[in-house]
Amino acid sequence: MDNDFPIKINMQALLADNSQRNMALELLEAWFNFQALKQGWYASEDFVLSFDIHLVTEVDFSEKSQQLNKSNWLFDDENMSLVNFNPSDLLTTGFIGLTQNDLALAKQSDSQFEACLKRKILTVINTIAAQNGLAII
């Protein structure tokens, strides 16, 4: 599904072979965008935060965190996330690492896995929203 939603979530590398999970991810992405709309994030066309969130394995996250200039990135060890907010284009790029336990949830329970993803993604987007004076979701 190609869209122009301000909040985009990419997890294709992890779930490319599972169309049901891809559909669930698209629904989750739509949920985040709808919640942002309800909170008034899109009230001003001149100030719309955009998010490009990448969900990656723990190994890929570790490699990415070593490659990046951390002075430009917010690192959250507890949430295993790296976030960069660019104020010139209002774009936040984020990488969220999924542990082996997180990925095991995907095999055990779709609802628990979705709740895990929702919690991790909310932590990232709410941090940037709060820094920019927007209501958190």
Image (cartoon, rainbow, N blue to C red):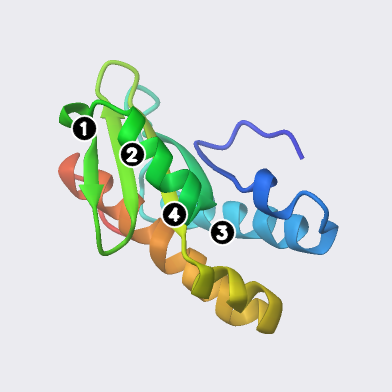
Is disc 4 placed on a helix, strand or loop?
A: strand
Q: In which quarter of the image is residue 68?
A: top left
Q: Earlier in the sequence, mark 4 or mark 1?
A: 1
Crowd band around label 4 with a 10 angstrom C-alpha radius: few (<14), some (14–19), many (20+): many
Hey, what amino acid is under mark 1? Answer: Lys
Residue 40 bears which disc, if any?
Answer: none
The percent coordinates of residue 33 (x first, y second) are: 51, 49
Q: Quadrant of residue 48?
A: top left
The percent coordinates of residue 38 (x first, y second) are: 43, 56
The reply, left or right, for residue 112 in relation to residue 97 is right
The reply, left or right, for residue 55 in relation to residue 107 is left
Up-down: is 59 above or below 101? above
Tell me how far mark 4 sits from mark 1, CA to CA.
16 Å
Q: Report the front residue among 121 and 130.
A: 121
Residue at 58% x, 71% y: name it. 114
Tell me how far mark 2 sits from mark 4, CA to CA.
10 Å
Tell me how far mark 3 sits from mark 1, CA to CA.
30 Å
Q: Name the residue under label 2.
A: 65
The percent coordinates of residue 55 (x first, y second) are: 52, 50
The percent coordinates of residue 3 (x first, y second) are: 67, 34
The reply, left or right, for residue 31 in relation to residue 3 is left
Q: Which residue lies furthest to the top in this view?
A: 88
Q: Name the residue under label 1.
A: 70
Residue 97 bears which disc, if any?
Answer: 4
Is disc 2 placed on a helix, strand or loop?
A: helix
Tell me how far mark 2 sits from mark 1, CA to CA.
8 Å
The reply, left or right, for residue 17 in relation to residue 81 is right
Residue at 62% x, 80% y: name it. 111
Hey, what amino acid is under mark 4? Answer: Gly
